[in-house]
Image: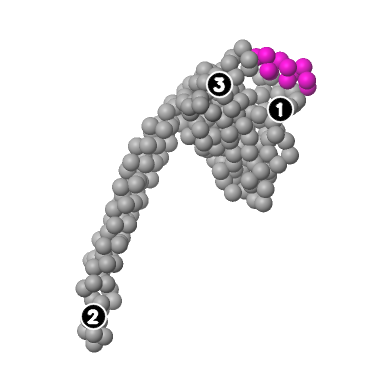
Amino acid sequence: MGLGAPTGLVDTRAEYQHVFDIYVPIAIGVFALIVIATLLAVLVYRRRPPERAARWYEHDRLEGGYALLLVATVAFLLYITFTAEHRVDTVAARERPGLVVNVTGSKWEWHFNYPAYGIDLYSGAVGRQDLVVPTGEAIRFRLTSVDVIHAFWIPQLRYKHDLIPGSVQDSTLTFSRRGVFAGQCAEFCGLLHSDMIFDVRALSPAEFTTWARSQQAAGGGAA
């Protein structure tokens, strides 16, 4: 589109890039360790006769140390993950939104409700209406699901959040430039999962006001 990626109100790219920079070296290190140990075992013991095979099958200290290392690694990764998530959610929650949009996921349709304007839009297996937002304003998305877990994903914004049945979760974002940005459900939710798509259409504040008035005049749900 030539517009570049819009930026989020909270720079999730920087937060999660930090998490990525920790996860990937650990994953590469573990993979390399396993490969090297396997190759060494093959090279060192490949010609050993059967009668010289090891008679023992357990090593408590080695196995205990390995288990402790795994537990410590998992605890560390969980800590940095939830810390980053908490920072993002805390900053977003404190921002005063200029617009609230209720986003409801269901099999296999998105429902976008604008409570301040009385507008209801749908996109997915049945409808294909855009999620329209103004640029340069904080937008509070209130996310929920009526059946299974869905995921509200806007790839160009590098933003994805699960929609949990029985729970309402708030996320605050902004779009810094005009354009149309593809979105979809990123959690497999059934047979028509691939049809659960939508477009975010970011307009200037003046254009958004004109659009909202036209939707209200048309009954709040025109395409």
Q: Nearer the viewer, residue 2 or 51?
A: 2
On screen, residue 61 versus residue 87, left or right, reads left
Q: Which residues are magenta?
A: 209-219
Of mark 2 and mark 3, the one earlier in the sequence is 2
In which image quadrant can residue 69 be found? bottom left
Q: Earlier in the sequence, mark 1 or mark 2?
A: 2
Residue 98 place in picture, x, y as percent: 56, 18
The answer to whether 215 appears left or right of 200 in the picture is: right
Residue 215 is a magenta residue: yes
Image coordinates of residue 85 in percent, x first then y, are: 43, 36
Considering every residue shown, the one lying at the far bottom of the view is: 51
Q: Which residue is mark 3?
A: 178
Where does label 1 land, which residue? 120
24 inside magenta stretch: no
Of badges 1 and 2, the one in the foreground is: 2
Which of the two labelled residues, at mark 3 and mark 1, occupies the earlier sequence position?
1
What is the x, y in percent for residue 184? 59, 39
Q: Is residue 133 left or right of residue 62?
A: right
| Element under disc 2 | loop
Q: Is residue 155 left or right of residue 63?
A: right
Alpha-carbon span between mark 1 and mark 2: 72 Å
The kind of residue tagged 3 is Arg
